[in-house]
Amino acid sequence: MIQLATFPPAFGLRNVSPFCLKTEMLLTSLQLPFELVEEADPRKAPKAKLPYLIVDGEKIADSELITQYLDQVTQGQVYADLSAEQKAQGTAVTRLAEDHLYWMLVASRWLDSDWWPNVVEGFFGFVPKIVRPLITRLARKQVAKTYDLQGLGRHTLAEQKSFAERDLAALEALVSHEGYLFGQTPNIFDFTVASLMAGIYDNQPATWLTEIAQSYNNLKTYTERVQAHVGVYGREAV
Ligand SMILES: N[C@@H](CCC(=O)N[C@@H](CS)C(=O)NCC(=O)O)C(=O)O
């Protein structure tokens, strides 16, 4: 049985990481039997990030490499019916979502001082209480450094928000009013966008990014549509 290592629920989200949720959606849509296993400490992952897949004792890390692996073992089912142009567009959208907008989701949770206590509670419950203040401070410093190196961290918050608006407007314009990115069936690229947006829309309490995203109605209904189609939701069941 395939196992998918994901974070424990946090912030009202059953599956808190967009990369983990995307992979869960993909495995479900491919109808491959799998189980979720919780890993609270990403340092235990092969590349110190989640998700990773465990297949016959072998660990495959990184959602994109997992996607390639699943495409291979299903004889090309992941990208079936996609033209070379659609694949190229999907890859470009993935980079926008995962290498740009995603970082503002991280910053809106970790680097907003009002939101930060939720991160401590949601992500660091597994750390012994005595060392938690030290460990969380160091982890936050590391995230701030990464955000700075990425480049977004060098902008004012108002400027970061304007970058987020342009990313969201691009996604809003790309996603269809009724169907999915490339037709009437969602595929891996829809899972990429919807899993990120589910985290942005449904994390509790709202972050500054949630508030900005609320006005993108098309994106919001699309995010719901993708989750409903696959039957996999980021948020916890109510
Ligand atoms: N490129 C990786 C990104 C995975 C990733 O950034 N995971 C985050 C959670 S959303 C993580 O594990 N972060 C822990 C850390 O950086 O310490 C993928 O597609 O799997």
Image: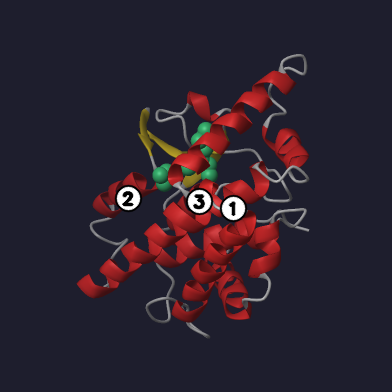
Is there any visible trace of residue 171 in the rendered image? yes
Between 13 and 218, the one nearer to me in the picture: 218
Contact (CB < 8 A) between labels 3 and 2? Answer: no
Q: Quadrant of the C terminus?
A: bottom right
Residue at image location 40% in from the left, 28% down from the top = 46
The residue pinned by badge 2 equals 70
Amino acid under disc 3: Leu
Image height of 112 relative to 87, above or below: above
Picture coordinates of residue 212, whole percent (x, y): 66, 67
- Report x, y in % for residue 129: 77, 18
Residue 31 sits in which quadrant? bottom left
Rendered location of residue 111, percent (x, y): 65, 43
Amino acid under disc 2: Leu
Name the mark on residue 152: 3
- Displayed quadrant of residue 164: bottom right
Find numbered disc 1 in the image and state the secondary structure of the residue it sits on: helix
The amino acid beneath tag 1 is Leu
Q: Residues within 10 Å of mark 3 (few under 14, many from 20)?
A: some
At horizontal 60% and vertical 47% (from top left) the residue drawn is 107
197, above or below 104, in the image? below
Q: Name the residue rendered at 47%, 78% in the picture.
A: 175
Q: Residues within 10 Å of mark 2 (few under 14, many from 20)?
A: some
Indicate if the residue with disc 1 has its beta carbon within 8 Å of ligand 1.
no
127 vs 57, nearest the viewer? 127
